[in-house]
Structures are given as structure tokens and as C-alpha cells.
Amino acid sequence: MRKLFPLRKRLFSLPIVLCLASGLTGLAAMAPVEPFSNAANAQEVKLKIRGSGLPVPRFVTLKFNEVNMRAGPGREYPVLWAYAKTGLPLMVEAEFGAWRKVVDHEGTTGWMRGSVLSLRRMALVTEGSTRIYRAADPQSQIVAVAEKHALLELQSCPASMCKVASDGIKGWIDRAAIWGVLKSEILD
């Protein structure tokens, strides 16, 4: 049995700006989209203004090792965070032209240009020492243990277990132990 370790680097550096800019004209009326909406929240407005046409919310990943999260949809807005890990999953909750309003696994929200994001699906382990099983059954053989913050390729997620891969290891992990798939989303 092999052990998958977390990221060696911090996922992001210290914040450069501690407060959001006030006066985000045209954006103050946006209603955030809950990542795990139920039937009662299904009527919420999902902001897409000249966006990609892809569904919102959805998960994406970082294309590059150095990506800035900004306070608003434009380079004129201050940088809130600098992310430093290719493949880190983020949830898109709104679109404004070429910009995507994203949320990370800790709930931090900001804007990134769509060109720095990929549709490749990855999962971030959010619980420590999470088992990866040979089959989609917790009674099957354990093939690896993934530590908190380990990045795994997300291959499918048909039910409560998701198929993942990393460093030649393939197996199934509990959906509740990862960030990178919507609660009601089915991936085949």
C-alpha cells in the first residue's frame, strides 16, 4: 500500500490585500450561487454576462503554477491571493466576460481570468488519511492512503464514491473526503 502525500508547497501565499475594494460598480447586486444548492435554492440567479456558456456552478482547475485571484473582474482590481499549484480545483460561481468568479476549498472568493483555468477535473483531499479502495465499495481492498491536500485526478463520480488516479495508483475514494465535485453532480 502506497501513501499519497499532500502538496509540498503552500497552496497560496499570504494575502496581498486584506480588504475588498469598495465600489464594485455593477457587481454589488450579484447574488452568490451556493455550491450545493437544493430544490429551494434552485431558483437562485446564476450570473453569466457574456460568459463561456458553460454551466454555473462548475469545477475547473488552475492551468499554471502562478495565478492571481483579484477583488474584481479586471486587471485594475487588486490581487487578493497568489496561487502556486497547477491542477488546484476551484468552483466557478459566476462569469463576467472573460473573467470567472471562483471559490477555493477554504471558501475564499475572487476573480480569475478564464484563460488561466482548465476544464480538467482534479480533486483535493480535504480530510486527512483518506483511504483509496480498489473498487467502489468500502469493503474492498485498500490500495493507497491519501493525506490532506493531496491532488488526485478525478476520473468519474457516479455515486458516493469517486474514481481517482495519482502516480500510477487508481482507485475509489469517498466523495465526502474531496473537494472538486458538486454534491449532486454525476461524472461518467
Image (cartoon, grey):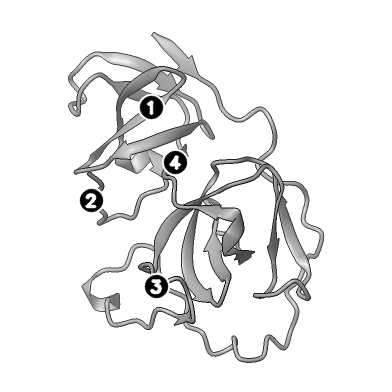
Residue nearest the observer in this picture, 86 or 109: 86
In this view, 61 is above or below 29 = above
Quick check: marks 1 and 4 in contact, CB under 8 Å? no
Which of disc 4 and disc 2 is earlier in sequence?
Answer: 4
Is the residue 179 above or below the residue 114 in the image?
above
Label 4, on which residue? 122
Q: Quadrant of the N terminus?
A: top left
In the picture of the structure, the residue carrying the numbered disc 2 is: 186
C-alpha separation, residue under disc 1 versus residue under disc 3:
29 Å
Which of pointers 1 and 2 lies earlier in the amino acid sequence?
A: 1
Question: Which tag is nearer the camera, tag 2 or tag 3?
Answer: 3
In space, the residues marked 2 and 4 are separated at their CA atoms by: 14 Å
Q: Quadrant of residue 27?
A: bottom right
Q: Residue drawn at (41%, 17%), measured in percent from left and top?
A: 168
| Element type at mark 4 | strand
Q: Is residue 130 above or below residue 56?
A: above
